[in-house]
Amino acid sequence: MPLLRKCGILCHPTSLPGRFGIGELGEHARRFLDFLAAAGQSIWQVLPLGPTGYGDSPYQPFSAFAGNHLLISLDQLIEEGLLSQEDVAWAAFPQNKVLYGPVIEFKDRVLRRSYQNYVRGGPQALQEEMGEFRERAKKWLDDYALFMALKGYFGGVAWINWEPDIALRQTSALEGWRDRLHEEVEYHCYLQFQFDRQWRKVRRYAHEVGISVMGDVPIFVGHDSADVWSHRELFWLDEKGNPTVVAGVPPDYFSPTGQLWGNPLYRWGLLERNNYAWWVDRLRAALAQVDVVRLDHFRGFGGYWEVPADEETAVNGRWVRGPGECFFQVVRSELGTLPFVAEDLGIISVDVAALREKFGLPGMGVLQFAFDSDAASPYLPHNHTEDSVIYTGTHDNDTTLGWYASVEESVRHRVRVYAGSDGSDINWAFIRMAMNSVARMAIIPLQDVLGLGSEARLNQPGREHGNWTWRYRLEMLRPELAGILLDMASVSGRWVAPGTELGDPSPTVLEYEEPEMDSAN
């Protein structure tokens, strides 16, 4: 019987250990995958892999297609002769968090040195590999590289504030600036090439040790991105490139003014007439990097909250119908499959639930949301369904220990009663509930496995600074933790020993004979 139940760990690559201030796609990525394999896990979930900008958020990248060059392994570049140990000499970085300012400055200096060495004498095989990458990435690479070169030239300001001719992509301006910034454009192409080849190695190693990678695609893109700059026609913008309407979330109990995200909104009608070509390209590119994609804010495909761009809050918005079934029919036709997980947390209407079910996409559940209401909560394990992915918490939640310490005693009491715990090991109680859930997939943030508190929280929505910085230290991945997880995965049917299979729980089929007929006296 094939193994249908799976489990995995959520850990973004920036959180990996290493000596250069931020996680990288090298030795420590492979060590982490070794830990997952030893722990009986089959999934590594990561956040969006794009190049981060303001606030260092992976959910506001400068491109929906490019990779984050800060993740490039410098040790691999040293092994390949593109850097020396002297090139990377630098004051020690902290091991438990990312200091983005110093890391960005250091990595840019060192990566430029590696590019210069590549140009002066990179191996012929590497040059040929670069040519192959350019061909694969031709739909987006040139625009992205020019965008980043221009952003550097104009001091990092948003594209809307560049000189008008290039901000609005006049043909003569595009040609002139490409010539003027040729070397900088080539540098950014090189960074994407190195990210791509290193990530491919990491993913290939993951497959070798039996791990699939789950990625993340946010439905919206940032206004200050290569995507909007190079495809203004796909978004609701005015003649100067400013958004006319933006994305958000309506007011609710927790936020009386709603949430004003500010992302430009798609012109779905135009996208439909183009057979959703840009979106198909985006999802195809994502699935070239990962095996399964989590669709962030899935409800936006059914309907989304539209707010006029001049509003200061999200109060005066309206619900607008999304692309719905037509979108997923086209994507399935173009890609042949829909390996997606629907992030369906929050306000989920009947139509959005029906959309997810129609295309057989698993939804999500979060155990931290299960104990602030009554026994009907869909997040309580006795209400879980097989077609779902259960989390103890997500990247937006506090760690389980941090959450438990912050909630009211009445909530903690319900947790203890339900979990059969005295509260001393509540992170493991939550992990056990997730693993034993009927949900086909269980994902645990690494911080919960390590038993860490709020100091290890990755993101706190609404906080302007200090997010996305947490890193673990290598010694935290202790073998005994892998052993505990392996046992849990085994007894919950999420792992079986190599060469064995789970038993078949189907009822036995018996052949019955007809009873002899009694003769009547």
Image: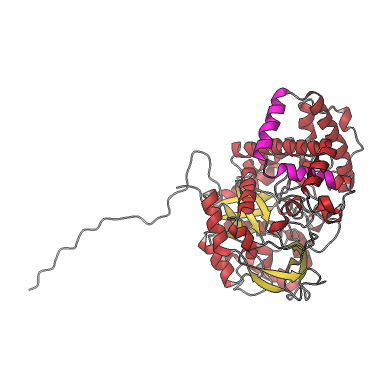
The image quadrant of residue 345 is bottom right
Name, please, the residue furthest toward the left. 521
Q: In this view, does 365 lie to the left or right of 241?
A: left
Name, please, the residue furthest toward the front. 172
Name, please, the residue furthest toward the right. 91
Q: In this view, does 348 lie to the left or right of 519?
A: right
Q: Which of 136 and 207 is in front in this view?
A: 136
Q: Up-down: is 269 above or below 48?
A: below
Q: Nearer the viewer, residue 19 or 166?
A: 166
Residue 267 seen in this snapshot: yes
Residue at position x 77%, y 25% in the image: 122
Q: Is the magenta stretch mostly helix, strand or loop?
A: helix
In the rendered image, residue 249, in percent from the top left (x then y), is placed at 72, 69
Which image quarter is the C terminus in?
A: bottom left
Residue 488 seen in this snapshot: no
Q: How many marks?
A: 0
Q: Which of 332 and 340 is in front in this view?
A: 332
In the rendered image, residue 312, in percent from the top left (x then y), is placed at 83, 71
The image quadrant of residue 126 is top right
The image quadrant of residue 425 is bottom right
In the rendered image, residue 475, in percent from the top left (x then y), is placed at 77, 41
Residue at position x 60%, y 72% in the image: 349
Residues rendered magenta in the picture: 124-150
Q: Is residue 513 magenta?
A: no
